[in-house]
Image (spheres, helix red, strand yellow):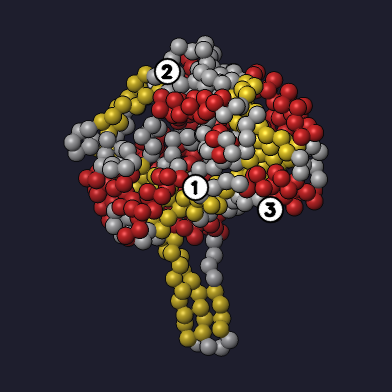
Amino acid sequence: MHLKEKSNQKVRPIDCRHFINGEYRDSFDMKTFENINPATEEIIGRVSEGGKKEVDEAVKAAKTALKGPWKTFTSSQRSAVLRRIGDLILERKEELAALESMDTGKPYPMALEIDIPRAAYNFHFFADYLTSMGTEAYQQDQQALHYSIRRPVGVVGMINPWNLPLLLLTWKMAPCLAAGNTAVMKPAEWTPMTATVLAEICKEAGVPDGVVNLVHGFGPGSAGAAITEHPDVDAVTFTGETKTGTAIMKAAAPSLKKLSYELGGKNPNIIFADSDLDEVIETTLKSSFMNQGEVCLCGSRIYVESSVYESFLEKFVARTKELTVGDPFRDETKVGAVISKEHYDRVLGYIQSARDEGGTILAGGGRLQEEDKGYFIMPTIIVGLDKDATCVREEIFGPVVTVLPFETEEEVIEQANDTHYGLGTTIWTNDLRRAHRVAHQIEAGIIWVNTWYLRDLRTPFGGMKQSGIGREGGMHSFEFYSELSNITIKL
């Protein structure tokens, strides 16, 4: 049976309301906005539009819940709740995957096989991790014993992006709850549905009322700004554009909130001549065009050693042209629709700038002609640009990559680091010494060698420069979601 038929048998889009103190609510003024499917351009539902009043109610509920039953949960009890949330996500996997695909335009198989299972695993991982944690203790000769205790940071505001809505929300929510905090989350206005279902799942799993709250709405001057400015929000975690991160930092400054940012990236993919080109091509297809290139870790700047530049391009272009673009619910679809008409126009604008600056389009370069509706852009490969060209310098966040040749190791390291961003890098080489040598010189928070998108949730995740502040993953997440107090006992 066709994937679309299988999905539509069970799943319909949902209208999205706020979730405050354990119940779904309309906005005080009953305002709503449209939820549009980017693959069909159809209105698939209405979303409650919140602002300061709704955020005030959500923060009040979260602050009260810090002193309620949630405060008395032991680490084992919190662990059991987190595990149950992960289990319930898997039980509703097909439903959540369909909602995610309708919201984002991404291929349904990707949501089903990657996004939803990894969202569940975030809860399963932190359910296990929190029961194995310890804290510091030091004996100061025979004078004193010093030990630390870890307590929740308080009410956490979560402002989530639209590209991997459930996956990235659970990446924040799981350690937040594991550490005993309460939360007020605001999903991106373009992707409200899975966050709305997650609130229901949390309640069903045994999370007390008021611990998890959800306010839909927009950013500046709306729900997002109300969260970042609120004096009773103790910490804000944000994934999204660097410009928005700057605005959040200004808004949070008066109350000195803790901040955790995972921001933009313009990630280099460095391919040396001694690498296995067949392996490189298949992984580079993913790192270029997975999720329509709307992944902060995508390697959109591809640098290829000149001796294999032409052979790489020949294979890469041929494989790119084989990718099926279109209806996200078709079995064979590999590239879906970009998130919105606004973003669609923005990405096409970048492609036109490449033409204007002397670039050559070897694949793609425009919309998918076979579809009458939907924001579909063909996977695009651009060559012939200068290292300072717009498409080489700026984050496009779409199915667009530039490919540039290089001669020496020193040259490619300089070009890779010549950016305001510093999120991820991929290095391809079979020379072990070169792999270590180059990796140590790359200015990025995450560096892969002969792979991409491979994660261990215990390891630090985050960016340098304008790609973020702080690290997430394992203990690094707990460092953000908790406060340490040192206790000294005189002996």
- Can see residue 42? yes
Q: Which residue does the image show at 25% across and 31% down from the upper left?
A: 32
Q: Earlier in the sequence, mark 2 or mark 3?
A: 2
Q: Earlier in the sequence, mark 1 or mark 3?
A: 1
Cα gap from disc 2 to disc 3, whole angstroms: 45 Å
Q: Earlier in the sequence, mark 1 or mark 2?
A: 2
Give above or below for 286 relative to 56.
above
Q: Which residue does the image show at 53% across and 52% down from the upper left?
A: 465
Q: Amino acid at mark 3?
A: Gln
Q: Position of residue 427 (x, y in %)?
A: 70, 43
Residue at the disc numbered 2: 40
Q: Is residue 75 left or right of residue 359?
A: left
| Quadrant occupied by the N terminus | top right
Picture quadrant where residue 440 is located: bottom right
Number of labels in the image equals 3
Of residues 249 and 470, the one drawn nearer to the viewer in this rendering: 249
Q: Position of residue 189 (x, y in %)?
A: 36, 34
- Can see residue 204? no
Q: How many other residues sit within 10 Å of disc 1, few (<14), some (14-19) or many (≥20)?
A: many
Of residues 249 and 333, the one drawn nearer to the viewer in this rendering: 249
* Element class at badge 3: helix
Residue at the disc numbered 1: 262
Q: Amino acid at mark 1?
A: Glu
